[in-house]
Every structure is written in C-alpha cells, then in structure tokens.
C-alpha cells in the first residue's frame, strides 16, 4: 500500500506529466545526468577500470607527471593517481547518497510529526533553530573528533547538521496541508494517525524533498571532501578526493595534479547534482510555472 | 520598533542557550569514553585522568552543566588541552586576521554580486543573464579549496602578482595587507558572490513587474536610477537575508581558506585543533561562531525596516 501511494504521488509530479506548453532545453540537465551516471559507473567498476592497486606504493616513481604507465601521474608515495581518483568516487558517492537518505528520512519523520502537533512544534523548532545556528562544518568536525573517524561517523557527522533543514521544509509543507479539507475529512472519518501522516500529508512533501535532497547530497559530498582535506575525515589511507588533495597540499608547486584531478572530479559531481536540483526545482515549483505563464 | 527590538533580542536568548545545551550534551552523550577518544590510542592513564578533570567529566552531569554554563556566561570557553591557555584568549589572539579577511570578503562579494544580479534581472532571458547564472552555479559548486589552488596557480605561481601564502596585519599598512589578502578574499568570495548574485537576480526580477517601477520609468527616470534606486532597494530584504544565512558558509570557507593560504586566524586555529585533538578549542569555536551567527541574523532582521520602509514593527 505504502509503495503504491509513493509511486502514485511521484507519477502525479509535473515532471512525469506530458505537456507541450513550453519547450525547455534539457541539454544542460542531460549533461549533468550523464556525468553522474559516469561517476556511478566509475565507482561501481573501480576495481576493473583502474590500472594499478590504489594503495600500492612505488617509491621509485614518486610525484611523476602523467605518462603511459600512470595516466594522471603519481602521488608522493608513488601511488597511481588515476586509480586513486577512481576509488575516491566510491567514498564520495556512498557518503553523499547515504547522508541524503538518512537526513531526509529522519527530517521527514520529525517534520511530519512536528508540523501536525502544535505543542510539539514549538519545542522541536526551537531545537532546530539552535542546530541551524551552529556552522555545519564545525558541528561535523566536533562529532568526528569525539567519535573517531570512520565512514559511518563521517556520515553521521554530515547528517546531523542537514536534518534541521529538512525538518523545516517538511514542517512548512505540513502546516499548510493540514488545513486542507481532505485532511480534516480524514481526521473526522477516524483515520489512524500514521495513515493521516503518511497517506495524506507525506505526498505533499515529495516534490520539495526531491529538490532539497539533491542539495543535501551535493553539500554532503562537499563536506566529506572538506573534512578529509582538513584531516578530520575517513582514515588518510583510504583514497578519497579530499584525502588525495590533502596529501597534495605539500607538493602543490611540484605536483599540482594531486590537487587538480580530484578537485575536478569533485567539482563536476557537485556541479552536476546542483544543476539537476535546479532543473527539478524549476519543474516542480508551482511559483515558477506561474511566472512562465505570465510571460 | 523598540518593543520589537527588545522582543527579538529576547527571542535570541533561548536559541543561544539551546546551542550551549547541545554543545554540552555532544561531549557527554558520545558513546564510549570521550576522554579516551580525545587523548588518542597512546594516552597513559595519567593523561586520561587529566583530560577528564579538565573537561569536568568526573562530576555528576547536572553539576557539570551548571558550573560549565556559569563559566560560559562569564566568557570562559574552557582551556586548551595542548597549550593550557584559555580558549577565549587563543581565539582573541587569532581573530584579527579572520575579521579583516571576512570583512574584505563581504565588501568584495556585495560590490561584485549585487550589480551582477541586477543586470542579470534587467537583461532577463538574454545571454547576459545566462552568463551570470552560469558563473553563479559554477561558483556555488566548485569547492573553496579548488578555487583557492587555481587562483594560487594562476596569480601567484604563473603570473607572480601576489605572494603564494602568508598574512600581514592591516595595522602594518593597507598595501601589504591587500597584497596578501586579495587572493584569499576572492577565494572566499566565490561562493558568496554566487549566492548573492542569484538572490539579487530573483529579488529584482520579482519587483521589476511592480507598478512603482513602471511609474518610475513612465516619469522618465534613467534606467540606471530605476534599477538601482527603485528596484534594488525594494529587493534588499531577501538579499540581506541571504547574506545572513550565508554566514555559516563563510565560516566553513574561512576554515578552509586560512589553511590553504596559511593565515593565522581562527580557522587555522580550528584546523590545528583537529590535528592536535584539542577538543575544547573546537567546542569554543562552535560556541563563538554560533553566537556570532545569531547576532548577525538579529542585526539583519532589525535592519529590514531601514531598507524597506514598508516593514514596520
């Protein structure tokens, strides 16, 4: 049942409706999607696409520029940069998607309940206000330095500051939706609370959540890289884009490739996700449609 | 207005207290022994005991909270585990470079982004608009440290216009200060410019259709006056708001930028604290920056009626 309502609601979203009122170029979002698909393929197939073991050190070929043997050159320990950047995609995408799913899930649950109960709402929103006042990077740094760094703690550290943003969004949607006649009717008809929240209120939050989710994902990938870059991320032996760049800092003037290639991969991923988010917002936001129609 | 100001300041207090409670609980509710994690694998029992005592972990939790909170209200942010100096003092010693860098960044961002946003809205749907929007999306997506290293490569290493790293206090002359602060400020500004330009464009676009803009044009005012006097002023509120909420991004940027450019500010202090596992310093930074964040947004809220006289309290 839950499954069918989810897809039912999703299929009613404007982006799945066919309408030919105004043409829109899908070139840029198409490119963005292509880049992300490539990134996912690279992450999944890293062991087959890489040319070397990303952890194998070859002291005789340290800090080499790109060559036939080493496509993108080597790092300070003689490890193949190309293979390391490929493997780096795994951590970035895993943490990006994982943090998004967790923070959207938790934020949705808190937001639905808090938007529905006025008394609870006042308390929950004060807590969320306080959480939002803490700069997210510093909060993540504090969590990591208290729990020790692993993929899971980094993911947790990224999730904590993102949750209040999702809560606020879901709550604002629920606040307007709960005044709708169909919700009142459901309450009057004696629907159970979980059913009201999930079947009647939750579908309203889907469209804004899709947009918000893309931004959460981009921000999670960025935060993971920054944490690694600052030495507060996953173990420095793990090839992540942030870790590779952190090691490259000391050698920037002789071997800029260690900053350049992971930086490029990171920027392209974040750019693509943001572009897809913008496209989703343009398609889903009713205010944008009104503006288009007015033109 | 006075009553509103007073109410608004009062409303900020519970937020700050909740931040403090949260920061307090963060250390206490961490699974495992936080003292052991902070001390690292090589710690002796002696060191563990010292850390526990200096964090106050050896007393009941309620006692811990009130004694900690009482000291906090008096401006005591704790003591560094490494250097044994009060965190507030360490922050005081490092804050000047950060403030001068942040101010330069905000001035630079507003000076570049607001005109860009206005022009993009004015030439809505043309190549000018698309160029500004592209710059904005790219600026928002390329991480601060990538921007920083690209700028260093081009302007410091290849063109040799600026020194690669370092910082000179503004008290020692504006020339040497700017010479070293321009690259970091531009780096930091990249994300802010993207954010503000986007918001300015959207806000100006919204008001360009209003009657008073048509009136201003109809009475023969120059386009520049219409745009920057009539449209921009009415679009000021969302732009100000984004500057306030973007403050958190500025903090993140400061931490990263200072470590790239080797600037001895509070961002650098934070990074050193991460590497040295100096938790009290990190905690002090959170309390300080959250406090500034609340204060900045309070001031911005209060300034709305100055920019938009229609807003009265």
Image (spheres, rainbow, N blue to C red):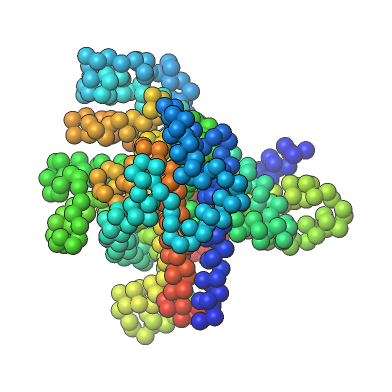
Residue furthest bottom as drawn: B219
How far across and how far down the image is residue A226, in percent? 39, 40
**Left or right of residue B28, residue A271 in this image:** left
Quarter of the image holding residue B235? Answer: bottom left
How far across and how far down the image is residue A258, in percent? 28, 30
**Left or right of residue A284, residue A62 in this image:** left
Quarter of the image holding residue B296? Answer: bottom left
Relative to residue B7, is residue A255 depicted above or below? Answer: above
> What residue sits 20% from the left and 40% below the top?
B153
How far across and how far down the image is residue B272, in percent? 33, 41
How far across and how far down the image is residue B1, in percent? 51, 81
Quick one: quadrant of the C terminus of chain B?
A: bottom right
Residue A184 visible: yes
Relative to residue A225, is residue B73 depicted above or below? Answer: below
Between residue A59 and residue A31, name the one nearer to us.
A59
Residue B256 visible: no
Residue furthest left as drawn: B160
> What residue sits 53% from the left and 32% below the top?
A152
> What residue sits 51% from the left and 71% below the top?
B9
Between residue A263 and residue B135, name the one nearer to us.
A263
Between residue B219 and residue A212, name the one nearer to us.
A212
> What residue sits 47% from the left and 30% below the top?
B45
Residue furthest right as drawn: A189
Relative to residue B112, is residue A58 depicted above or below? Answer: above
């Amino acid at each position: 049942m839950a499954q069918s309502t989810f897809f039912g609601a999703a299929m009613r979203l404007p982006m799945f409706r066919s309408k030919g009122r105004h043409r829109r170029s899908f070139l840029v979002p198409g490119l963005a999607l292509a880049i992300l698909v490539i990134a996912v393929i690279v992450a999944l197939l890293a062991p087959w696409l890489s040319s070397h073991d990303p952890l194998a050190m070859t002291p005789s070929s340290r800090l080499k520029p790109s060559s036939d043997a080493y496509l993108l050159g080597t790092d300070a320990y003689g490890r193949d940069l190309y293979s390391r950047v490929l493997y780096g995609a795994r951590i970035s995408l895993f943490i990006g998607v994982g943090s998004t799913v967790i923070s959207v899930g938790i934020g949705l649950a808190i937001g639905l309940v808090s938007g529905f109960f006025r008394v609870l709402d006042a308390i929950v929103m004060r807590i969320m206000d306080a959480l939002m006042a803490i700069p997210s990077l510093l909060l993540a740094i504090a969590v990591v330095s208290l729990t020790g760094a692993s993929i899971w703690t980094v993911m947790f550290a990224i999730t904590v500051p993102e949750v209040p943003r999702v809560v606020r969004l879901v709550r604002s949607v629920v606040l307007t939706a709960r005044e709708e006649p169909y919700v009142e009717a459901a309450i009057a008809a004696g629907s159970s609370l979980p059913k009201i929240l999930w079947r009647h209120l939750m579908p309203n939050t889907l469209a804004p959540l899709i947009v918000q989710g893309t931004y959460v994902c981009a921000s999670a990938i960025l935060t993971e890289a920054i944490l690694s870059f600052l030495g507060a991320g996953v173990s420095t032996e793990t090839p992540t884009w942030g870790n590779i760049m952190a090691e490259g800092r000391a050698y920037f003037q002789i071997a800029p490739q260690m900053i350049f290639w992971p930086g490029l991969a990171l920027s392209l991923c974040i750019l693509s996700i943001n572009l897809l988010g913008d496209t989703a917002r343009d398609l889903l936001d009713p205010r944008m449609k009104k503006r288009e129609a007015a033109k | 207005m006075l009553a509103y100001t007073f109410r608004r300041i009062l409303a900020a207090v519970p937020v700050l207290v909740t931040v403090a409670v949260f920061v307090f609980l963060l250390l206490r509710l961490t699974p495992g022994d936080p003292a052991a994690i902070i001390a690292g694998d090589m710690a002796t029992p002696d060191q563990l005991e010292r850390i526990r005592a200096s964090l106050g972990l050896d007393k009941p939790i309620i006692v811990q909270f009130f004694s900690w909170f009482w000291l906090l209200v008096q401006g005591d942010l704790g003591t560094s585990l490494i250097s044994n100096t009060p965190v507030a003092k360490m922050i005081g010693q490092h804050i000047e470079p950060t403030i001068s860098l942040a101010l330069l960044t905000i001035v630079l961002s507003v000076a570049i982004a607001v005109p860009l946003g206005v022009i993009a809205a004015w030439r809505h749907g043309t190549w000018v608009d698309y160029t500004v929007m592209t710059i904005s999306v790219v600026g928002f997506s390329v991480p601060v440290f990538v921007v920083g290293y690209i700028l260093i490569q081009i302007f410091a290493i290849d063109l040799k216009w600026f020194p690669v790293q370092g910082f000179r206090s503004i008290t020692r002359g504006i020339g040497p200060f700017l010479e070293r602060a321009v690259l970091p400020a531009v780096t930091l500004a990249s994300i802010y410019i993207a954010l503000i330009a986007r918001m300015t464009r959207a806000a100006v676009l919204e008001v360009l259709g209003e009657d008073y803009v048509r009136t201003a044009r109809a009475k023969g005012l120059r386009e520049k006056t219409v745009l920057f006097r009539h449209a921009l002023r009415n679009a000021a509120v969302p732009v100000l708001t984004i500057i306030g909420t973007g403050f958190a991004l500025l903090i993140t940027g400061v931490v990263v930028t200072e470590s790239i450019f080797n600037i001895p500010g509070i961002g650098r202090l934070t990074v050193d604290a991460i590497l040295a596992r100096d938790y009290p310093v990190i905690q002090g930074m959170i309390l300080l920056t959250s406090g500034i964040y609340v204060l900045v947004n309070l001031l911005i809220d209060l300034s709305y009626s100055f920019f938009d006289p229609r807003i009265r309290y």
